Image: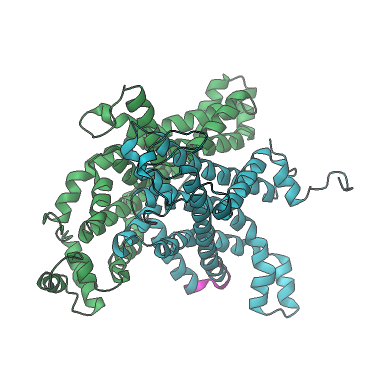
Amino acid sequence: MSRRAVGARPSFIARVAGHRAGLVGAVIIGALFTLGMLAAWIAPYDPLAANIRIARQAPSAVHWLGTDEIGRDILSRLLFGAGLSLRVGVLAVMVGAGVGVPLGALSGYVGGLVDLLGQRVVDTLQAFPGILLAILVGAIVGPNLEWTIACLGILAVPVYTRLVRASVLQVKQLAYVEAARAVGCNELRLIARHVLPNSLSPVIVQSSLQFGFTVLLLAGLGFLGLGAQPPTPEWGGMLAQGVAYLRSAPHIVVFPGLIISVTVLALNLLGDALRDALDPKALSGKIR
Amino acid sequence: MIAYLIKRLILALPVFFGITLVVFGALRLAPGDPALAIAGMDADGAAVESIRIEYGLDRPAYEQYATYMGKLLRLDLGRSVITNIPVLEELTSRFPTTLVLAVSATIVATLVGVSLGVLAARFQRRWIDYLVMILAMGWLSVPNYVLGLLLILLFAVTLGVLPAIGASTPMHYILPVLTVAAVGAGILARQTRASMLEVLSEDYVRTASAKGLASRSVLLHHALRNALIPIVTLVGVIFGNLMAGAVIVESVFGIPGIGKLMVDRIHSRDYPTVQGAVLLISMTYVLVNILVDLAYVVVDKRVRLT
């Protein structure tokens, strides 16, 4: 350990790592990301190669997680599915934060009519319970992955806008912002360099939770037959295809169900840890 | 109180307006011809043309929206492309089922979540606390469609004690209600615990304990009552989310509510019905949140309505 003044706050990384549950979450997500990205190289079988003669086999030494309803290797499909889910998650969070953060900053910083109008738009978007908007778009444009990603991203915009707006409203009255303005800092630079960075902690926490929410929604849409289409190895779709064999071959449903749950759990644990670590009120990283 | 309710309803008008705008505008997102989207891909030219005229798709967008709103105000949501029954009729016949599911799930989630949260706070850092927090995290993380399938697998397929598909008896509602309730119970348990811990460190709670009140009475009357304020907001949000959750869960359990109707009709591209269902669920969500604001007053006498 490096030398540190007694009672000083441990570094951010140390605080997250010191949070045992958060560490577990981070490790799981890291592992899933690595496995998902390397799926093309490490997957034991082709995720699309069907062989009806070995359909619905229970887990064995040859097919570790068994085979699905048309004899495809479930482990391989889950690995490729991990890549897809996590990529969509990252993209949707980027869309959400990319649009929501500047919008929230503008709304909070400029105020007035811009703020009023912006907040009514946000109100409206938030009036739709999450998945409904995605279903609505899915119903119109048909199952289409690009639209799904865009839609999942747009769903995240209001949350980011609210968060950033609230914290910008708080930060912009602080003395150091006044000081920066007094030395002639222009407005854009003021927002970007002095106001926004101090509003970012809630954004980071939200991104972790939003990521989990996106993975969950994507699989939910897949389950309903929207989003990614068969034969694409997508977790929700795999779940849906297994429903008919719930009685005879439950493993087709159980494994995708487990991996979706574990991914969301890991992101929730990570989100909790990030919130604790970034909360200035928490003096020590170790909450529990 | 009445005046406040009216004021809130008026303030909600822009949101209602916005919802109709989104639901209406979504049709314009359709790649290609919206008339074709409504009529179905396999419709012939004459059918598409009659849809175009019926929906006024040959006129400018603002005019179409005005017509749409005019019909909406007369509760005319159009007819289902599949069954040719008025959408309003289709929706109202299935709405009670969804409502029963969402309301029962909200009640179960609130009872379970709040009592577990109080327990966890009372026994902070003891095993009960850890157990409750682990359970809550699990309920938050397992998606409802996965939980539903796992519950069917356990209680219907393996144990054979509960029915899995349909909604013909109250027994049929047990698994779906538990499935929908889980995420809400998880959120509420966590919020109740946090909120209770905050309140338990307040002076008035210490005073109540110091003057010798039974700890049960302090916990329930002094602490919980004050801890309830953030919880009430959450119950409203959760009701909305559980209603959206019911959309998926109905499909898992084959319950003939609005959610299943909507999902079934998406696949047959029955656009007016999907549109109507989204509209109805969103409006209910907004209304519930207004009711929640009113519930504040009942829970917390300090809140003044202005």
Residue visible at 40% across and 53% down?
A130
Quarter containing the C terminus of chain A: top right
The picture places residue A265, in percent across and down from the top left corner, at: 54, 42
The picture places residue A193, in percent across and down from the top left corner, at: 69, 71
Residue A288 in sight from this viewpoint:
yes
Q: Could you say which quadrant of the image residue A155 lies in?
A: bottom left
Which chain corresponds to the colour cyan? A
Q: Is residue A232 left or right of residue A27?
A: left
Q: Is residue A112 magenta?
A: yes
Q: Is residue B300 left or right of residue A231?
A: right
Colouring rule applied to residues: by chain
Q: Could you say which quadrant of the image residue B60 lies in?
A: bottom left
The picture places residue A36, in percent across and down from the top left corner, at: 56, 52
Relative vertical location of residue B150 with respect to residue B36 in this rendering, above or below: above
Q: Is residue B256 left or right of residue A71?
A: left
Residue B300 in sight from this viewpoint:
no
Chief secondary structure of the magenta portion: helix
Decide which of A163, A257 is in the foreground and name it.
A257
Q: Give the residue at the far front of this rendering.
A: A53
Relative vertical location of residue B248 with respect to residue B133 in this rendering, above or below: below
Quarter containing the N terminus of chain A: top right
Decide which of A254, A261 is in the foreground and name it.
A254
Decide which of B155, B86 is in the foreground and name it.
B155
Which segment is the magenta one? A107-113
Q: Is residue A106 magenta?
A: no
Badge count: 0
Q: Could you say which quadrant of the image residue B181 lies in?
A: top left
For chain B, give the colour.
green
Relative vertical location of residue B62 with respect to residue B73 in this rendering, above or below: below
Residue visible at 64% across and 72% down?
A191
The picture places residue B36, in percent across and down from the top left corner, at: 20, 69
Residue visible at 58% across and 48% down?
A32
